[in-house]
Image (cartoon, coloured by chain):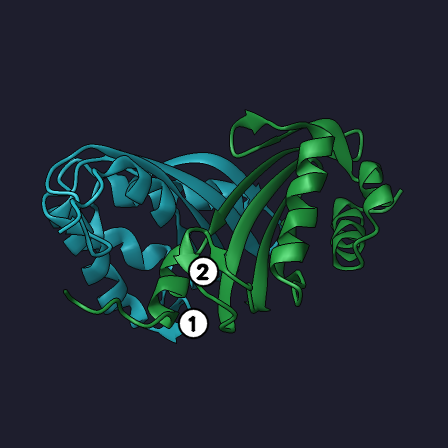
Chain colours: A green, B cyan
Amino acid sequence: MSALSDLYQEYIECLNNQRWHELENYVDRNVAYNGQIVGLAAYREARENEFREIPDLQFSVSILVCDEKMVASRLDFDISPIGKFLGMPVNGRRISFSEHAFYEFDKRKIVTVWSVIDKAAIQAELPKRHSL
Amino acid sequence: MSALSDLYQEYIECLNNQRWHELENYVDRNVAYNGQIVGLAAYREARENEFREIPDLQFSVSILVCDEKMVASRLDFDISPIGKFLGMPVNGRRISFSEHAFYEFDKRKIVTVWSVIDKAAIQAELPKRHSL
């Protein structure tokens, strides 16, 4: 059996190629995201929505650390969300930022995700709001 | 020699107890933080400033993943910064959030840190600004 790092890279390829029907091979049906059980269907829907709202979305792993049951990943993004992103008016601008995520695996499927996105980096790239 | 996880926990204890003279045992003198070489002196000064601005600062490791040369850590904070924190007017309120950080070690010292703080979580805890 391959290491979790290989399995994780397969999961990222699955996302990048939007092979949604294969997602169940990597994500548990009771997956939890940032402390809430969302389940596979909602997890898939959230990822599909991201690709709709960010047509050039690609996940790029720049750091990967793993042990027997967990993967930690730094993901770099260089993307152009169409409208708002995390509540910020990006409106098609190209933004670059990273996400740091931890994934807990059970029986070789992701059961828990803890993700933090570098919102401060994005805010720094957007024009300042005009003072009234 | 102990695993990097043990060494990292010692580093966190060193911070929590503000044993600044011991920091050089864990941090390389050419340490880089989020892509910039800052060096040990400035790294120490930044951490000392944090404890001045956040008197109840404590680092609490909730997830730790490590391999032979890297540590990935989820750090939970439950703190009350006196004034502004990351540009936000916290003003003594108690806030809870996490930081996800990657540490690269060389010769058992931290040479590179990549850190992302969950600024969105903090923003959600602060009162909304009044509209003008």
- Given the image, on which type of amino acid does mark 2 rest? Trp
Q: Earlier in the sequence, mark 1 or mark 2?
A: 1
Q: Residue at x 86, y 44 (%)?
A: A22
In the picture, measured across the screen, residue A15 lies left or right of residue B38, that is right
- Given the image, on which type of amino acid does mark 1 rest? Gly
Mark 1 near mark 2, Cβ–Cβ under 8 Å? yes
Q: Residue at x 61, y 61 (%)?
A: A54
Secondary element type, mark 2: strand
**Residue to which mark 2 is pinned:** B114
Relative height, residue A89 to residue B22 (above, below) = below
Query: Is A111 in front, or is B129?
Result: B129
In the picture, measured across the screen, residue B100 lies left or right of residue B119, that is right
Give the image quarter of residue A63: bottom right
Give the image quarter of residue B17: top left
Query: Is A94 in front, or is B46?
Result: A94
Q: Residue at x 45, y 45 (%)?
A: B7
**Residue to which mark 1 is pinned:** B35
Relative height, residue A101 to residue A131 (above, below) = above
